[in-house]
Image: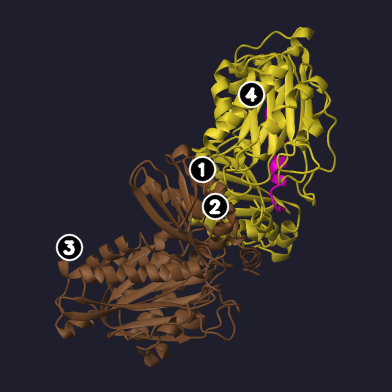
Chain colours: A brown, B yellow
C-alpha cells in the first residue's frame, strides 16, 4: 500500500449494495504489514456456485493449486484471502499452510475443506505463517457482515494505491440481481491469466458450469486484455460466486449458458470485469497515464491482439508515453516485432483522433503541436490500422515511469 | 551520443590492425547531430565476399530492403552507413534515398549499385535527406584509409555512450588472417535479428555462401542472445565481409563451410561476435549492471533460451537487479510465465555462486548478507536449473534503471 495515490484513481467509489447470502470480515494479522488489515474472510450462508480462472504460470502458488483442486465440485462456503505473502514457491510448507487455513476456515464456517477457496498475494518465496490468521477465522466468521466491500478491497491490497470495487445490476427473467466485485493488482500484471486477485459475487441463482462458461468468456476482453509490465503473476486468481439468494424472489435457476435470460446478466458481468481490470491498469505501478491500444485491419482477431500487446508491452512505447512524446516510430517498431503479418506501406497510426502516419510514412497533415496536446492528456488512445484484414482487438496499459523502477527496485526488502 | 559514459564501458580499446583491401572514411553531414561525424564509408579495393543477417521485423527499414536485394549476388565494393536517421517507415521517399545514396557511392567507387550496402540508424519515420551526404562520398572515397576503426565506430553511434570495436586473429591453413568488427546499439535491442548495426571485415579469402553459413550460426549465441529492452529494431543489420587479401600470402580460397581449415576462424569469429554483442548490452540505455542469465536442465536448448529470455526481459527482474535486490521470487515468476515446461518443486536458482532456492523453496542455507554482496557487483550472474532435461542457454541483459526511462522519455524531440 503506497502512501501516494495514483493520479488515475477513481474520483469516487460507488455505493456497494449488499449481496444476500454473503458476509465478510477483515482482520489485521500482521503477516507483513503493520497497522492495516491483511486477511479477508468471505462466508456464504448457503453453498454458493463457484467458477474460477487462474494464472497460466507453470509455477503457480500453493493457493492456486488448492483452488484448482476444489473447483470441479463447484460449491463454495468460504474464501480466505491474505495479503503480504503470496505463499508461492514455498514447497511443502506452502501446501501445509493452505491445509491449515482451509481446515480452520471449514471449522469456523461448519463446512468441508472442499468448499473453501484460498488466495494469497505478496512476496514470493517466503514461508507463510498461516497460524497467524488461522486462529482468528472463527471470530471473523462470527462478526462478518454483508456491508463490507470497500474494507474487503483494502485488506487484499499490496502495492495498490487505492482499493478497487465495482457493482452492476441486471435482470434474470423479471428478477433483479446484483453483481459486486473487488480486485487488487498494480504490478506483475499481464494477460494470459485472470489478474492478480479478484472476487466477484452475485445473488443470482446460476449453476457452476454456467458461471464458469460466463467467466471464461468474460475474462478475455477484460483481465486478459490488460498489462502493466508483461509479467505474469504466480498467484493470479479470479473467482466468481453465485449465492442463489435471488431464488427467494422467484428467480428460476439458470442451468444452461445458452439461456436467453442470461443476456443482460452477461453484459453486466462483462462490464464489471472490464471496470475492475481497468482499475488495475490505472493503478499500474508508477502509472501517470492510461493507454488504450486498438488494432484493426489485422489478419484476424488473434493477430490483432498479439500486435496490440506487442505495442502495449514495449518499454520504448511506454516510456515515450511517459515523456508525452508522440513517437509513432516506436509503434511501427512494435508492430514489426510482433511477428504478425504487416505491410509497412499500408500502416496507418493515430494518437487520439489525429492520424500521424499513413501509407508507410508520416501523415502529410501531421502537426507536432496538435499531437503533443493529445499526448499531454491523462488517457492516451493509440489506434493502428494494419490495412490487411478485419481483425480487431483493444488492450489497455499504462506508461512506464521512473516511479515504476523506484517501486520495483526495492519492493522485497 | 550521451555525455555520460556507461560505467560498464571497456576500460581500454584494443589496437585495431588494418585489414588489407579495406579503407574507410567518416564525415560530418549534419543529418541530425551537430559537431560530430555521422556518415561512414567503407570501400573495398577489390570485390569482397559478403554475408548478412537482418532484423526479423515485418516493418524493416528501406536500407534493410536494399541490402536484402543485393545480398544474393554476394559481392561488395562499398558500404555507406549514417546515424541520426533510420530511414525507416519513410515510404517511397525512403526508397528514393537509398537509391540516391547507392548511386552516389557506386559512382565514387566505380562499381555497380548492386555492390553497395547501406545501413541507417536513428529516428524512425523522418524523411532522410540523402543529398546531405551523397555529395561528399566522392571526397570520402579519395581520402579513405585503412586505419580508421575507432573513428568508424564513433560515426555510427546514436544513444551509445562509447564506440564498440573488437579484433581477433586466426589461421586458415598456415596463413594468418585478421577479423575486425564494429557495432552500435544501446536501445531497441532484442534478439530475433542481428543487432542494431554491426560490420565485420576479414582479409581471409572465403566464398560468400560459406561466410553466410558462418554468420548465421555465429549470430545465434551472440547478437541473438542479448536483450536490452525486448524491443526489436526495424534496422538491425549485421554484415560480414571477406576481402580475400590473404590469398596474397598463399591462403587457398575456402569454398565449403565444412572445410576443417575453418575451425580456428570460426572460433575467432564467434568470439568476436560475442565480444561486440556484450559491448552492446554493457551500453544498454541507463545500464548500471550487466546480467548473465544461464538456464540449464530445461527440456531442450530452445526451451532453455525461451526461459532465459523470459527472465532477461522481465521488467520486474531487471528493476530488482537495479535495486541490488536478490529477489529470486521474480525469477520463479519469469520461469513460470515463459510457457515452457517447469516444475516448481525441482527448480534451483543461484545468484553468482550462491544457491538461493532449491526443491521449490528457499535454500535452507540462504544468507541475505552474502547474496546482497553478489548483487552489489557490476556483473551479476543468474543461474536457473529447471531440473527436467539437458537443455541449456545463456543470454545477457542489463538492469532497468530510472535513467532508461529518462533517456527514452525524450529521445525523439
Q: Which residue lies at the image location 49% right of the left edge and 40% below the top edge?
A: A360
Report, in whole angstroms, how far the alpha carbon at label 2 lies from the one at label 4.
33 Å
Please state the chain letter of the residue tagged with numbered disc 2 in the rendered image. A
Please state the chain letter of the residue tagged with numbered disc 4 in the rendered image. B
Report, in whole angstroms, how far the alpha carbon at label 1 lies from the one at label 3.
40 Å
Report, in whole angstroms, how far the alpha carbon at label 1 lies from the one at label 4.
27 Å
Element under disc 2: loop
Extent of the magenta region:
B267-287
Q: Is residue A219 left or right of residue B238?
A: left
Please state the chain letter of the residue tagged with numbered disc 3 in the rendered image. A
Report, in whole angstroms, how far the alpha carbon at label 2 lies from the one at label 1.
10 Å
Does residue B343 show up?
no
Q: Is residue B284 magenta?
A: yes
Question: Do badges 3 and 2 share one subunit?
Answer: yes
Question: Do badges 2 and 4 share one subunit?
Answer: no
Report which residue position mark 4 lands on.
Answer: B102
Please name whichever residue, A77 or B81, is drawn nearer the observer in this view of the structure: B81
Check whether the beta carbons of the residues at disc 2 and disc 1 lie within 8 A of each other: yes
Q: Position of residue B370 (x, y in %)?
A: 73, 61
Amino acid at each position: 500500500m503506497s502512501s501516494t495515490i495514483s493520479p488515475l484513481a477513481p474520483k469516487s467509489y460507488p455505493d456497494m449494495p449488499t449481496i444476500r447470502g454473503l458476509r465478510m470480515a477483515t482482520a489485521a494479522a500482521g503477516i507483513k504489514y503493520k497497522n492495516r488489515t491483511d486477511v479477508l474472510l468471505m462466508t456464504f450462508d448457503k453453498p454458493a456456485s463457484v467458477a474460477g480462472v487462474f494464472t497460466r504460470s507453470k509455477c503457480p502458488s500453493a493457493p492456486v493449486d488448492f483452488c484448482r483442486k476444489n473447483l470441479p465440485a463447484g460449491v463454495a462456503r468460504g474464501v480466505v484471502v491474505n495479503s503480504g505473502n503470496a505463499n508461492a514457491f514455498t514447497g511443502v510448507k506452502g501446501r501445509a499452510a493452505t491445509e491449515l487455513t482451509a481446515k480452520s476456515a471449514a471449522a469456523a464456517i461448519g463446512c468441508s475443506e472442499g468448499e473453501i477457496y484460498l488466495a494469497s498475494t505478496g512476496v514470493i518465496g517466503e514461508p507463510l505463517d498461516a497460524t497467524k490468521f488461522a486462529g482468528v477465522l472463527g471470530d471473523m466468521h462470527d462478526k462478518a457482515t454483508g456491508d463490507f466491500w470497500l474494507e474487503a478491497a483494502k485488506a487484499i491490497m499490496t502495492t495498490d494505491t487505492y482499493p478497487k470495487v465495482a457493482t452492476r445490476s441486471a435482470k434474470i427473467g423479471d428478477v433483479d440481481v446484483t453483481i459486486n466485485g473487488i480486485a487488487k493488482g498494480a504490478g506483475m500484471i499481464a494477460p494470459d491469466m485472470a489478474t492478480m486477485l479478484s472476487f466477484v459475487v452475485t445473488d443470482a441463482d446460476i449453476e457452476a458450469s454456467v458461471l464458469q462458461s460466463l467467466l471464461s468468456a468474460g475474462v478475455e476482453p477484460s483481465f486478459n486484455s490488460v498489462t502493466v509490465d508483461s509479467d505474469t503473476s504466480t498467484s493470479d486468481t479470479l473467482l466468481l460466486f453465485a449465492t442463489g439468494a435471488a431464488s427467494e424472489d422467484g428467480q428460476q435457476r439458470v442451468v444452461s449458458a445458452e439461456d436467453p435470460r442470461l443476456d443482460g446478466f452477461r453484459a453486466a458481468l462483462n462490464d464489471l470485469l472490464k471496470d475492475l481490470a481497468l482499475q488495475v491498469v490505472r493503478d499500474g505501478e508508477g502509472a501517470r497515464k492510461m493507454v488504450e491500444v486498438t488494432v484493426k485491419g489485422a489478419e484476424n482477431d488473434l493477430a490483432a491482439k498479439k500486435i496490440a500487446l506487442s505495442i502495449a508491452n514495449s518499454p520504448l512505447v511506454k516510456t515515450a508515453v511517459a515523456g508525452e512524446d508522440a513517437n509513432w516510430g516506436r509503434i511501427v517498431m512494435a508492430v514489426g516485432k510482433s511477428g504478425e503479418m504487416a505491410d509497412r506501406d499500408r500502416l496507418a497510426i493515430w494518437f487520439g483522433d489525429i492520424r500521424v502516419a499513413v501509407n508507410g510514412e508520416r501523415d502529410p497533415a501531421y502537426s507536432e503541436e496538435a499531437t503533443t496536446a493529445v499526448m499531454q492528456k491523462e488517457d492516451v488512445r493509440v489506434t493502428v490500422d494494419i490495412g490487411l484484414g478485419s481483425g480487431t482487438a483493444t488492450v489497455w496499459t499504462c506508461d512506464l515511469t521512473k516511479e515504476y523502477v523506484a517501486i520495483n527496485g526495492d519492493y522485497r526488502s
